[in-house]
Image: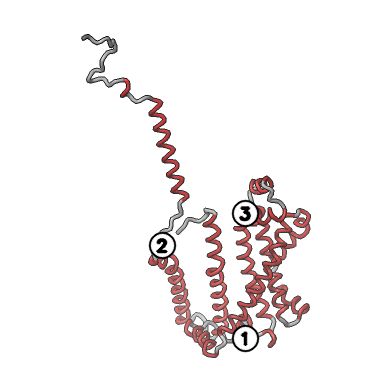
Amino acid sequence: MASTDSRPEASADRPAASDVPKASDGGNASDASDLAGLEAGLDALDTRTTQRTPLSRVLRDKLLPPVVAIVLVVAVWQLVYVLGVKEDYQLPGPLQVWGAVADLWYKGTLFEVIWTSVSRGVLGFLVAVAIGTPLGLLVSQVKLVRAAIGPILTGLQSLPSVAWVPAAIIWFGLTDSMIYAVVLLGAVPSIANGLVAGVDQTPPLYLRAGHVIGATGIRGIRHIVLPAALPGYLSGLKQGWAFSWRSLMAAEIIAHSPDLGAGLGQLLETGRAYQDMSVVLSAILLILVVGIAIDLLVFAPLERHVLRTRGLLAAR
């Protein structure tokens, strides 16, 4: 029986209309593929890599360069000593200085001298943080206060810490209070100015968003201002510690009393009084080592953590 269907049959070399992909279907498939790729890329960016850095790479990148630098400095120092550029009493060699440090060790006074200075520096720095932080917030938030004492803080920060020692001796006598006063006068302006700089660098959008969600006053400072100003504040803390340590050394070098105990500054002055350059250089090296150790053990990890959590430091 003849078929009544008048539609032409699909030839072998021409596909049926139903087999031809529609432009709209192809567009949707392409869009879906692009969105899937975009989502996969965003997921990859959000995923934290937990791959642990090999120990050999850590030793090569972090430990080897400073060790090589120290070895080169000691080698140049020994060479200058051997060539006799300066007399022995003016520039002793590394072995003589090491002998002075070993002598302190054998006498049992090495850690006592270091601890006396470190405990003073840490306590003075903590008090400076307790004073400098609210002072910095006050200056950054109140225009009248900034206009009144902002320039004074900047001037105090540029004033050498040693200039405060004679005045502190007159005010407090040869006591620990005199030393802490010098430390505070040297560290507080740096901490306050660091916080002010961090607040000034806060994007205004953060503050407006805080006002929208009701984070004003103390809540705004706690949840918006301080977290946003944290990098600048941390820089101020590092500088504040540096000023604390320098101020402490200046006070210990100038002020002498049996009631003050023996710190690194007193050790340095004792070496000068006895014209013993081995003691002088050993004291300088101990002061340098303590300053580097505090930075590497305390401030460097804090700075890396803050920068990494804000996406400003690649995980390495």
Give the image quarter of residue 164. Answer: bottom right
Q: Residue furthest front?
A: 1
Q: Residue at x 21, y 9 (%)?
A: 1
Q: Mark 2 and 1 residues: CB-CB less than 8 Å, in contact? A: no
Q: Residues within 10 Å of mark 2 (few under 14, many from 20)?
A: few
Say which residue appears at 43% left-offset and 71% top-offset: 68
Q: Is residue 206 above or below residue 291?
A: above
Q: Earlier in the sequence, mark 2 or mark 3?
A: 2
- Residue 281 at x, y = what percent? 55, 80
Task: State the SS at label 3.
Answer: helix
Residue 124's quadrant in the figure? bottom right
**Circle 1: residue type:** Thr
Residue occupying image coordinates x 59% and y 80% = 115
Packing grade of label 1 (10 A; few <14, some 14-19, many >=20) is: some
Name the disc covering residue 270, or none: 1
Q: Is residue 49 above or below residue 94?
A: above
Residue, disc 2 = 53
Per the image, label 1 sits on a secondary structure element best described as helix
**Residue 271: x and y, percent?**
60, 85
Q: Amino acid at mark 3?
A: Ala
Q: Quadrant of the C terminus?
A: bottom left
Seen from the viewer's position, the closer of residues 141 and 209 is 209
Residue 142 rendering spot, x and y as whole percentages: 75, 54
Give the structural element (helix, strand or loop) at label 2.
loop
For badge 2, the amino acid type reads Thr
Q: Is residue 20 left or right of residue 283?
A: left
Question: Looking at the rendered structure, which numbered label has been put on residue 239?
Answer: none
Figure check: 29 above or below 187: above
| Residue denoted by label 3 | 228
Q: Badges 2 and 3: C-beta atoms under 8 Å apart? A: no
